[in-house]
């Protein structure tokens, strides 16, 4: 069973549009030493003839809204597949046991995806059986530094249905058109400005900030701070604007992550320092959040305006948590579970 981008599938009574198709190959099974594809030892000892498998992962966007799902189909497996969603939990739930592990490599990517051909990750799959159903938990430790987790269940392939009726065609067209708008922006087409205003007039289910993001003029952290009553200006420091925040550091960080729809470059968080440092980078901006005498401060501005001394100071801030970075990933995926799960983790 194979699907293409913008096909509509129905699973457990709910419809989804396929927005990305990622093909993987497993290279190392139950091994701890990683070899490159051209390595003679790899080819001799750990090649695909040793049992490596291939599988395809489909990113599914719910037609009626909600969190993004994933459908994973292993090549050659005729009866079952895996239906899951990305979560923040970093360890398997109680009762789950290690079922499989290895090294996976992305072979091809179609559609709108953060994955790139050649990306590698060490993965672990855990399983448990409850009430005759098999539940799964995945951990993917990407070699670029990010870790992803997903949780779901094994379902019958016969319960996955392709839909081609009029409602399915309408849903497919809507998602396809949204993807095309993003592609036009990336290509820098000169008439993006025209789409900006026409889209605002005719696309009623998008906010002004979302529309700006679609056509290449994303809302910034500095704009959010200036627009919100949470923040009070305190002057400038080393090329950055300084504000006080009425919220604690974590809530302030979440507010800024939400403002840019989770599209951050990276996040550093030092949870053990007295200042409770949090540094959020986008491709063009940086915000530095800290606590001084019980007051939350935010320094924000464009990276190009950052002084050498400030850049050096920020670089020395250590990082001991990926919680906010995972949350940003959830927001970018439009996964509403992200905020709720993060709040529970912080409270614990």
Image: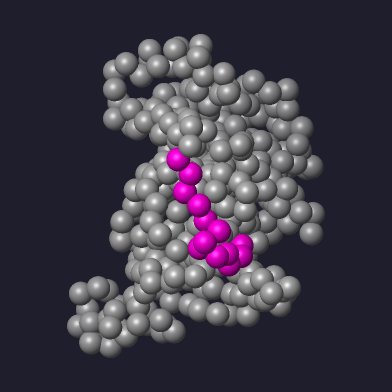
Q: Quadrant of residue 293?
A: top right
Indicate the position of residue 113 as horizontal and vertical percent values: 41, 47
Q: Is residue 316 above or below residue 247?
A: below
Residue 245: % across, % down: 72, 32
**Does the rendering let one see residue 232?**
no
Residue ranking furthest to the front: 165
Q: Within the image, what quadrant is residue 19 found in?
A: top left
Q: Residue 209 at what x, y percent from top left? A: 55, 23
Q: Is residue 25 above or below residue 177?
A: below
Secondary structure that dominates the magenta span: strand
Q: Residue at x 39, y 45 (%)?
A: 5
Residue interval drawn in magenta: 151-164
Q: Classify 167 as above or below 99.
A: above
Quarter of the picture containing the C terminus is bottom right
Residue at x-position 76% and y-position 54%: 344
Residue at x 45% of width, y 64% of height: 73
The quadrant in which the N terminus is found is bottom left
**Magenta stretch: residue 220 in it?**
no
Q: Residue at x 56, y 24 (%)?
A: 206
Closer to the camera in the image, 183 or 233: 183
Residue 98 x, y percent position in the rendering: 58, 80
Towards the viewer: 68 or 123: 68
Do we see residue 206 in this rendering? yes
The part of the image, by quadrant, that contains residue 254 is top right
Look at the image and say whether residue 162 sits in the magenta stretch.
Answer: yes
Residue nearest the viewer, comparing 115 with 34: 115
């Amino acid at each position: 069973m194979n699907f293409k981008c913008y096909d509509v599938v129905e699973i457990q009574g709910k419809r989804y549009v396929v927005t990305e198709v990622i093909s993987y190959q497993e290279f190392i099974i139950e091994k701890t030493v990683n070899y490159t594809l051209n390595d003679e030892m790899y080819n001799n000892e750990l090649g695909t003839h040793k049992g490596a498998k291939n599988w395809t992962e489909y990113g599914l966007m719910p037609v009626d809204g909600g969190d993004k799902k994933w459908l994973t189909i292993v090549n050659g497996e005729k009866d079952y597949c895996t239906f899951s969603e990305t979560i923040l939990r970093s360890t398997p739930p109680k009762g789950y046991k290690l079922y499989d592990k290895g090294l996976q490599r992305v072979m091809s990517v179609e559609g709108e995806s953060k994955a790139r051909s050649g990306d590698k990750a060490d993965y672990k799959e855990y399983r448990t059986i409850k009430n005759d159903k098999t539940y799964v938990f995945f951990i993917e430790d990407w070699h670029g530094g990010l870790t992803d987790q997903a949780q779901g269940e094994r379902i019958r392939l016969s319960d996955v249905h392709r839909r081609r009726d009029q409602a399915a065609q309408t849903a497919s067209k809507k998602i396809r058109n949204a993807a095309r708008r993003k592609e036009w922006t990336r290509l820098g087409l000169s008439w993006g400005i025209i789409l900006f205003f026409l889209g605002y007039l005719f696309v009623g289910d998008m906010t002004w900030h979302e529309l700006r993001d679609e056509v290449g003029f994303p809302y910034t952290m500095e704009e959010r701070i200036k627009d919100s009553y949470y923040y009070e200006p305190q002057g400038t420091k080393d090329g950055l604007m300084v504000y006080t925040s009425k919220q604690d550091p974590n809530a302030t960080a979440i507010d800024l992550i939400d403002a840019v729809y989770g599209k951050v470059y990276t996040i550093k968080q030092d949870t053990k320092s007295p200042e409770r440092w949090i540094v959020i980078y986008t491709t063009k901006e940086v915000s530095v959040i800290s606590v001084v005498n019980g007051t939350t401060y935010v320094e924000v501005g464009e990276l190009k305006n950052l002084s050498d001394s400030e850049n050096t100071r920020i670089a020395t801030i250590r990082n001991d948590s990926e919680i906010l970075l995972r949350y940003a990933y959830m927001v970018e995926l439009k996964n509403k579970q992200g905020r709720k799960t993060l709040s529970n983790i912080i409270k614990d």
